[in-house]
Image (tube, rainbow, N blue to C red):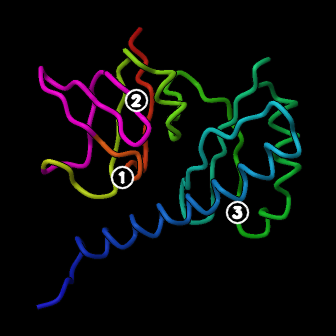
Amino acid sequence: MGPTGPFFLTGVLIANTYEKEKQLQDEIGSRVEHDLPGVEVLAVELANPDRFVVYVDHPEGVDHALCVRVTDLLRDYLREYSIDVSSPGVERPLRKPAHFAGALGHTVSLRTREPLDGRSKFKGELKDAGDDALTLGIDGTTIEIPYETIVRGNLIDER
């Protein structure tokens, strides 16, 4: 019997969401970072099928005026989507190896596309951020997670 039922449908929806986010990240990141020097697009996340959130950062901080400038650059997406532009906040998105390298020693949460060691959600101390994978310390053990498998990563506010 082939894959059916809610699990399969959920798996397909998650895969499609991840692929769409990746496509939007590439398109939007290139455009914003080219047209607004110094602005980094940290992540693009689909909040629902017709709304996405763009997390941006800038060395001088993120204010309302910068969010408006980013939104203006993305006007052509407004035909299909509602757009929110936001600063990274305390649970800063981590997507690129350089983002993870900047979070060494901190607690992060991750979600992978497919299960690793029987699970797809992880929370632990970021021990290492190599070229192809990171290492998390979880409950006295370590696990290596390839970047290519990560669909979400966030710094955890430990205050």
Could you tell me residue 110's position as x and y percent? 35, 39
Q: Which mark is residue 81?
A: 3
68 relative position to 145: left or right: right
Disc nearer the start of the sequence (3/1): 3
Q: Which mark is residue 108?
A: none
140 within the magenta span = yes
Q: Which mark is residue 129?
A: 2
Q: Residue at label 1? A: 149
Is the residue under label 1 in contact with that under label 3 (CB below 8 Å)? no
> Residue lying farthest front?
131
Could you tell me residue 118's position as x and y percent? 13, 51
Residue, x 61% and y 49% (percent of image)? 44
- The quarter in which the C terminus is drawn is top left
Could you tell me residue 37's position as x and y percent? 86, 35
Residue, x 70% and y 29% (percent of image)? 57
Could you tell me residue 9's position as x and y percent? 31, 75
